[in-house]
Amino acid sequence: MLEPPSSSLERRRAAPLVPDVEDIPSGYERLVCEERPVKGTSVRLFTFPDGDTDPSRTVVCLPGLGASGRSFAPMEPLSRLFRLLLWTPPLHTPATHSPLAWNLAVLDHVEARLPERFALVGSSYGSLLSIAFALAHPERVRALVLVSPVASVRRVRRLAVSLSTLVRAPRPLAYLVAPMVARVLGGARLPPEGRAEIVREARRLTPLELLRRLRDVLAADFHPRLHELRVPTLVIQGGRDLLVPPEAAVDVARHIPGARLELLRDASHLPYMSHPEAFNALVGAFLEEYGVAPRELRG
């Protein structure tokens, strides 16, 4: 049942600029959260309550720097077609690993209880992790969807990436900078609830953890190895992205054999949050073609 426009407007006005960590914004609270222990750490795994449960249709979604799997809530329409697992990287990385290396180990560990093969959707930092996982474990990846892809720091605006850490600013400074940074990330079309979710979740991380993840991004250079990827790949890029220039996404798609590129001209860095209908249409069609087991094998 559609909600009256006035009620929807009231909900958007109610979204706080700097929400408390446990203040889940409207539209993001329906997700089911499982705390899954893996390698002695805890992974928060979000799912849709009425979503598909067929393991052969599994799609693991990896969020951006400082975000959680909950940020993929606007993908809910696809949950009826695919088993969406909205993965959240562990909040803390042991000193023995870099965040990227730790997340790769956790994703591939038997305790993660992921199927032998699945599709990956990675946004920003999540795209970096997706590329690294597909290179390390090509036999496990059915398909890749890279959103605002980060493959090499040489093709990312360093200053803009550094600014993304300001969502962790302490109050009252956070009231000034965090909503502005969220607006830069999401663009003018990002709903207030989406902005609140970005700010809320990033504030869950310690400054040290966020800094270590940022260093992963700034040190990354998978560009020379993109040609090794041999899985169907869709690259989705916002035309107004201030962190990852559109030409960087074009370059990534050009170097991955057979990759498709889709440009959402009015979107920014988080098109699945700001332009969910267009994003879901592109991803749904691609995954139906490449990301799940053939229908005759699913029974």
Image (cartoon, grey):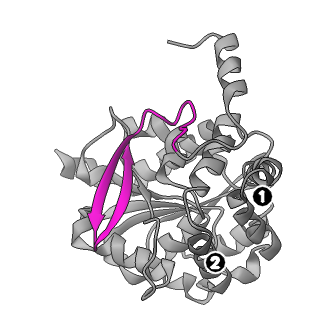
Q: Is residue 15 left or right of residue 93?
A: right
Which residue is the extreme one toward the left?
Answer: 299
Q: Say which residue appears at 60% left-offset and 57% top-offset.
A: 202
Q: Is residue 135 magenta?
A: no
Residue underneath mark 1:
241
- Left or right of 254, for residue 93: left
Nearer to me, 169 or 254: 169
Q: Where are the magenta residues, as a range?
A: 22-47
Alpha carbon separation for disc pair 2 and 1: 17 Å
Which tag, 2 or 1, sits closer to the chain's start? 2
Q: Residue at x 67, y 32 (%)?
A: 15
Measured as percent of width and height from the top left, residue 128 is found at 56, 73
Residue at label 2? 217
Image quarter in which the C terminus is found: top left
Q: How many residues crowd mark 1 within 10 Å: few (<14), some (14–19), many (20+)?
A: many
40 drawn magenta: yes
Callout 1 amino acid? Asp
Nearer the observer: mark 2 or 1; the answer is 2
Mark 2 residue element? helix
Instruction: Judge by depth and name the residue closer to the eye, 205 or 196.
Output: 205
Residue 146 position, x and y percent, is 56, 63
